[in-house]
Image: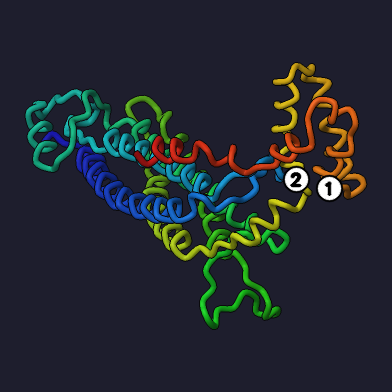
């Protein structure tokens, strides 16, 4: 008496997405715990940090995982906010004017089913709410893909610092028995593409005609179940991937030393500037010795110790002291305190 079909459907959708969000938040919690456990396990596992895919300066695997944990926490917060935004109902009639039912009915119904009341509605609950929900899922998927892509890079044969778990009897390739492929990570990368598409579809649903048209309905019949099921699968798969991840510290150490110590170039540069050398001149001095490793295969420390201009500024002992991992680890406790409390 006085209701429109969307009064029922949109209120029910708010309940369904709210309950789906609760399950997804539980999945994120499981993934965050797995990352936290491995972060503390490998807090001091030193590896090379890379920018542009090229060796930069040392980092630890634990630090890398702490970054992931913090990012997942932001995704969790976004999903919590989106849950609150979408957990609303409306019983306001054909164009939202309560012409045939008073607002008290809407308030009663929403209270009974645990939803907030949409303060103002047309024939439908406005779809910016749902767009926030699905873009939050798309962002979560993009973060999971970021983590998965890093694992894929670190599993490459030439790098092989990490590796997905590989069960006895598992096949990496039907044709090549030696293969151990990062199939779990690749799977996550593919599914993230779906989520981004669903996020765009949800945003396309926002500009409906007047008080409502039906163009959003067919979209939501696909993206609502699909996106929530995909995310539920992804967070649980990612949790298992992290728990079973194999770490190779010896390989990390070997890769760290691969370029003959050039990863400590900034330390030399800063020491020279502290001693009064012009920074640009110091940069040129350090760079020319670093380039000898790339162009001639000369060990960086050996090149520095043979440079008479540098030896006027620093002793051999002072140069050697710059080749230390300690400065790169000294603030780990503070970083972990910031992230994990």
**Image spot of residue 300 (x, y percent):** 82, 43
**Image spot of residue 229 (x, y percent):** 38, 56
According to the picture, the residue beneath numbered tag 2 turns out to be: 261
Instruction: State the quadrant of the C terminus.
Output: top left
Which of the marked residues, 2 or 1, is nearer the chain's N terminus? 2
Q: Does residue 108 sit above or below 240 in this rendering?
A: above
Asked if residue 198 can be seen in this view, the reply is: no
Q: Depth check: 26 or 133 in front?
A: 26
The answer to the question of whether label 2 and label 1 lie on touching residues, with beta carbons closer than 8 A, is yes
* Distance (Cα) linking label 2 and label 1: 7 Å
Category of crowding for the residue at label 2, using alpha-carbon neighbours closer than 10 angstroms: few (below 14), some (14–19), many (at least 20) = some
The label on residue 265 is none
According to the picture, the residue beneath numbered tag 1 turns out to be: 299
Helix, strand or loop status at disc 1? loop
* Residue plotted at (69% across, 39% down): 321
* Residue plotted at (62% across, 44% down): 325
Seen in the image, is 5 located left or right of residue 153?
left
Q: How is the image coloured?
A: rainbow
Q: Depth check: 192 or 292 in front?
A: 292
Q: Locate residue 2: give its quadrant.
A: top left
Q: Depth check: 66 or 149 in front?
A: 66
Q: Does residue 314 sit above or below 26 in this rendering?
A: above
């Amino acid at each position: 008496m006085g209701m429109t079909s969307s009064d029922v459907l949109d209120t029910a959708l708010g309940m369904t997405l709210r309950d789906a969000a609760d399950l997804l938040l539980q999945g994120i919690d499981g993934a965050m715990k797995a990352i936290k456990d491995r972060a503390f396990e490998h807090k001091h596992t030193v590896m090379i940090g890379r920018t542009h895919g090229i060796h930069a300066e040392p980092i630890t695997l634990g630090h890398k995982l702490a970054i992931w944990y913090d990012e997942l926490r932001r995704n969790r917060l976004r999903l919590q906010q989106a849950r609150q935004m979408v957990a609303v109902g409306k019983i306001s009639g054909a164009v939202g004017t309560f012409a045939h039912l008073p607002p008290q009915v809407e308030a009663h119904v929403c209270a009974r089913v645990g939803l907030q009341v949409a303060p103002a509605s047309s024939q439908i609950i406005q779809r910016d709410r749902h767009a926030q929900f699905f873009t939050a899922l798309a962002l979560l998927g993009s973060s999971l893909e970021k983590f998965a892509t890093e694992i894929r890079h670190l599993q490459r044969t030439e790098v092989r610092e990490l590796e997905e778990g590989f069960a006895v009897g598992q096949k990496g390739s039907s044709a090549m028995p030696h293969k151990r492929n990062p199939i779990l990570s690749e799977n996550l990368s593919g599914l993230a593409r779906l989520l981004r598409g669903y996020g765009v579809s949800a945003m396309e649903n926002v500009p409906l005609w007047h008080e409502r048209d039906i163009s959003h309905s067919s979209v939501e019949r696909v993206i609502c179940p699909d996106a929530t099921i995909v995310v539920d699968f992804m967070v649980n798969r990612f949790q298992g991937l992290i728990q079973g991840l194999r770490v190779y510290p010896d390989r990390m150490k070997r890769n760290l030393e691969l370029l003959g110590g050039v990863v400590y170039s900034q330390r030399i540069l800063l020491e020279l500037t502290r001693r009064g050398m012009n920074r640009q001149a110091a940069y040129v001095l350090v760079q020319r010795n670093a380039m000898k490793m790339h162009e001639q295969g000369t060990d960086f420390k050996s090149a520095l110790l043979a440079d008479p201009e540098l030896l006027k500024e620093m002793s051999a002992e002072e140069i050697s002291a710059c080749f230390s991992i300690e400065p790169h680890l000294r603030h780990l406790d503070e970083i972990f305190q910031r992230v994990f409390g």
